[in-house]
């Protein structure tokens, strides 16, 4: 029973991490477009958001790798 609880928690956390990755990629693409157009009114904020999304993507990617390895450990039937 405890194995299923871990598996459920890891599946939910993987889903949350995928949505966070998608949101950060979307934010990075929008702010990157604003930076390249040079018509931004608030360049400091756009630059901060672009850096935030880049650093956030690195953190979320490391967390996704950890969840991937943990979810393989708690799988009920491990394929060869």
Image (cartoon, rainbow, N blue to C red):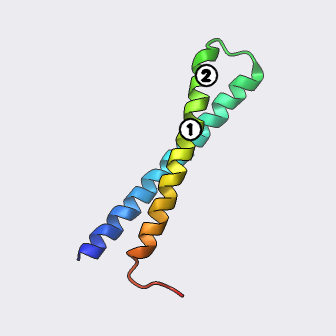
Q: Secondary structure at mark 2?
A: helix
User: Which residue reaches farthest bottom?
Assistant: 80
Mark 1 vs mark 2: give the one in front: 1
- Residue designated by label 1: 55
Residue 3 position (above or below residue 27): below
> Which quadrant of the figure has residue 67?
bottom left
Element marked by disc 1 = helix
Residues at circles 1 and 2 in contact by the CB criterion of under 8 Å: no
Location of residue 5 in the rendering, given as x and y in whole percent from the top left corner: 27, 69
Q: Of the residues under marks 1 and 2, which one precedes in the sequence?
A: 2
Using a 10 Å C-alpha cutoff, classify the residue at mark 2 as few (fewer than 14 neighbours), some (14 to 19) or many (20 or more).
many
- In the figure, is residue 5 to the left or right of 41? left
Residue hosting label 2: 46
Q: Which mark is residue 24?
A: none
The answer to whether 58 is drawn above or below residue 63 in the figure is above
Q: Nearer the viewer, residue 48 or 36?
A: 48
Q: Residue at x 66, y 36 (%)?
A: 29
Q: Is residue 70 left or right of residue 54?
A: left
Residue at the image point whose x is 38% and y is 75% from the top = 74
Q: Position of residue 62 (x, y in %)?
A: 52, 53
Expressed as whole percent of the image width and height from the top left, the position of residue 70 reads 42, 67
Q: Tell me what residue is drawn at x 38 percent, y 82 percent.
A: 76
């Amino acid at each position: 029973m405890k194995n299923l609880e871990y598996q459920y928690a890891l599946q939910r956390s993987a889903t949350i991490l995928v949505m966070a990755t998608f949101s950060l990629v979307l934010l990075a693409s929008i702010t990157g477009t604003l930076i390249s157009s040079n018509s931004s009114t608030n360049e400091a904020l756009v630059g901060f958001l672009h850096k935030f999304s880049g650093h956030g993507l690195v953190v979320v990617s490391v967390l996704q790798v950890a969840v991937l390895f943990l979810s393989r450990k708690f799988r009920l039937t491990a394929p060869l």
